[in-house]
């Protein structure tokens, strides 16, 4: 089950963790709008509250008052196909012989069914079809036989795929990042404790200071008294597989991921977009909100280019923030109507001008077609479309509910065919090489599966771009220590 989510974990010296966790989840709300939850521990017992909807809907004042304890973890969950149900809401909690366990997961395992089947044969009963529960059951089983660090290492040797986890074992909070570091996770210092979070923006919200990213394959254990943390490098992979789409779309612009400020990366992607496919036009405008940083960098590069005529950067589309996501509308007609409800052109910016629209991606093509039509209806003489990422030609198996190949407009169409489909005067995407350059990373250290069709993990029916040492899920024995 694919999940683009936000996770957080906090350990404080002598202050209740519930409200800081609640504020952190607000900071990560963009990563998940389906459900929100918090698990805390007061030194004697675990407390949990999980609710459907946005953070503000999932929690009331009385819910936070009942979440006692100075340590806790939290989760916000993104709605994915076939997964809109309460049993999949997180953190997932379980009590067992060796104590209590809570687990929040961002990512997607590609061998969850295999591990789950083995655990079921050993007598484990599952309440959902989510891979988070598989991880929790496997870890709980290992904790019956091993200390915390060795139990985590054993679980990491059995699960395969993308995961950033915050875990609560009794009153101990820990964070784990998969060996390829596909999903982000960072450590921050607070005035009276420490925090783990999917993005540094959550730490900023708590007036904390970012320390660093959790390293791929690393376990971070926060001290139960909030005074420090310990780290253990449990697995070392030859290459990472950082998701480039975190920088392109998912993460907040004010977050620092893999030591890069997302806002500046997006501006650099925009500058690269001008260098590769810039076209003279009267006005450059972003598709709000994600296209704004790209358009800013694109326009800056255009105005610095001595061979260009210069361009105006303008907000030509106004966004109605009270309209929901367009792809959940049940019919195509309603999806198209929702685009017009959500975005409205400023005619004085558009009328009689050539326009370059900057967006982060084209998935199905429905929104892009509607936007081009909106520009023409507002009087644009020409509409050029520039995309700050490569063509999305394949689905994501690493935690993003992107689309199937049948739904992806670029899966079986050339750029020219897509341009014709969305009725733009010109269309260009950013190259994969430019993305790697903007992120200051080698292509070998990025997950580019959705734009190449080759994945950094061994996925049934797909090709991989690297040698993959897929873990055995036989009767588990601890890997070499």
Image (cartoon, helix red, strand yellow):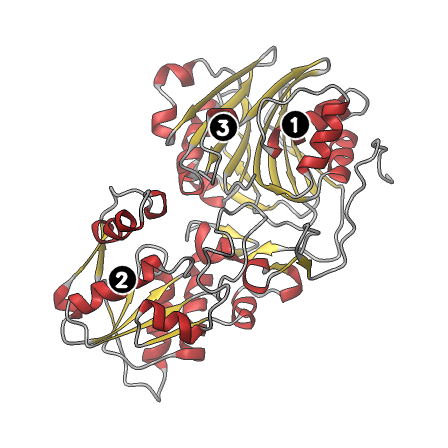
Disc 2 crowd rating (10 Å Cα; few below 14, some 14-19, many 20+) is many
Disc 1 crowd rating (10 Å Cα; few below 14, some 14-19, many 20+) is many
Residue at the far bottom in the pictured view:
307
Please state the horizontal and vertical placement of residue 117, each as a whole percent of the image: 72, 30
Please state the horizontal and vertical placement of residue 409, each as a whole percent of the image: 44, 62
Cβ–Cβ below 8 Å for labels 3 and 2?
no
Up-down relation of residue 360 to residue 55 (above or below):
below
Please state the horizontal and vertical placement of residue 368, each as a whole percent of the image: 33, 62
Identify the residue position indicated by label 2 in the image: 371
Disc 3 crowd rating (10 Å Cα; few below 14, some 14-19, many 20+) is many
Residue 89, label in figure: 3
The numbered mark, 3 or 2, whose residue comes first in the sequence reads 3
Q: CA distance from mark 3 to mark 1?
A: 14 Å
Residue 128 visible from this viewpoint: yes
Q: CA distance from mark 3 to mark 2?
A: 34 Å
Q: Name the residue located 76 percent from the left edge and 45 percent from the top edge.
A: 235
Identify the residue position indicated by label 1 in the image: 136
């Amino acid at each position: 089950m694919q999940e683009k989510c936000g996770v957080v974990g906090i350990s404080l010296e002598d202050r209740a963790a519930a409200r800081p966790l609640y504020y952190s989840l607000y900071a990560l709300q963009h990563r998940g709008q389906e459900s929100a939850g918090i698990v805390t521990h007061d030194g004697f017992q675990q407390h949990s509250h999980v609710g459907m909807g946005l953070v503000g809907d999932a929690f009331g004042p009385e819910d936070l008052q009942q979440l006692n304890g100075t340590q806790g973890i939290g989760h916000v969950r993104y709605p994915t196909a076939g997964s809109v149900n309460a049993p999949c809401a997180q953190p997932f909690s379980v009590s067992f012989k060796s104590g209590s366990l809570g687990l929040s997961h961002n990512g997607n395992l590609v061998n969850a069914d295999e591990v789950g089947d083995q655990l079921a044969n050993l007598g484990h009963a599952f309440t959902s079809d989510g891979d988070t529960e598989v991880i929790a059951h496997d870890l709980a089983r290992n904790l019956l036989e091993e200390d915390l660090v060795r139990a985590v290492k054993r679980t990491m040797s059995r699960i395969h795929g993308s995961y950033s986890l915050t875990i609560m074992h009794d009153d101990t909070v820990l964070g784990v990042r998969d060996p390829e570091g596909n999903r982000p996770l960072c450590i921050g210092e607070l005035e009276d404790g420490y925090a783990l979070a999917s993005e540094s923006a959550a730490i900023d919200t708590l007036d904390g200071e970012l320390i660093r990213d959790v390293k791929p394959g690393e376990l971070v254990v926060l001290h139960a008294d909030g005074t420090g943390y310990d780290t253990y490098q449990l697995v070392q992979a030859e290459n990472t597989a950082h998701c480039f789409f975190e920088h392109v779309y998912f993460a907040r612009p004010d977050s620092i991921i893999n030591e890069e400020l997302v806002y500046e990366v997006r501006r650099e992607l925009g500058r690269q977009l001008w260098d590769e496919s810039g076209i003279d036009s009267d006005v450059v405008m972003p598709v709000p909100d994600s296209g704004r940083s790209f358009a800013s960098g694109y326009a800056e590069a255009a105005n610095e280019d001595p061979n260009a005529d210069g361009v105006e950067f303008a907000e030509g589309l106004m966004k109605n923030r009270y309209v929901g996501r367009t792809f959940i509308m049940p019919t195509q007609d309603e999806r198209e109507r929702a685009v017009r409800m959500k975005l409205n052109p400023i005619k004085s910016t558009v009328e009689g001008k050539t326009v370059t629209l900057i967006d982060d991606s084209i998935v199905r093509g429905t929104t892009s077609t509607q936007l081009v039509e909106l520009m023409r209806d507002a009087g644009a003489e020409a509409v050029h479309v520039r995309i700050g990422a490569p063509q999305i030609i394949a689905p994501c198996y690493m935690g993003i509910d992107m689309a199937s190949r049948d739904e992806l407009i670029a899966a079986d169409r050339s750029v020219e065919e897509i341009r014709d489909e969305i009725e733009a005067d010109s269309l260009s995407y950013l190259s994969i090489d430019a993305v790697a350059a903007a992120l200051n990373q080698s292509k070998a250290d990025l997950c580019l599966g959705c734009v190449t069709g080759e994945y950094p993990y061994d996925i049934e029916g797909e090709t991989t771009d690297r040698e993959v040492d897929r873990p055995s899920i036989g009767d588990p024995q601890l890997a070499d220590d």
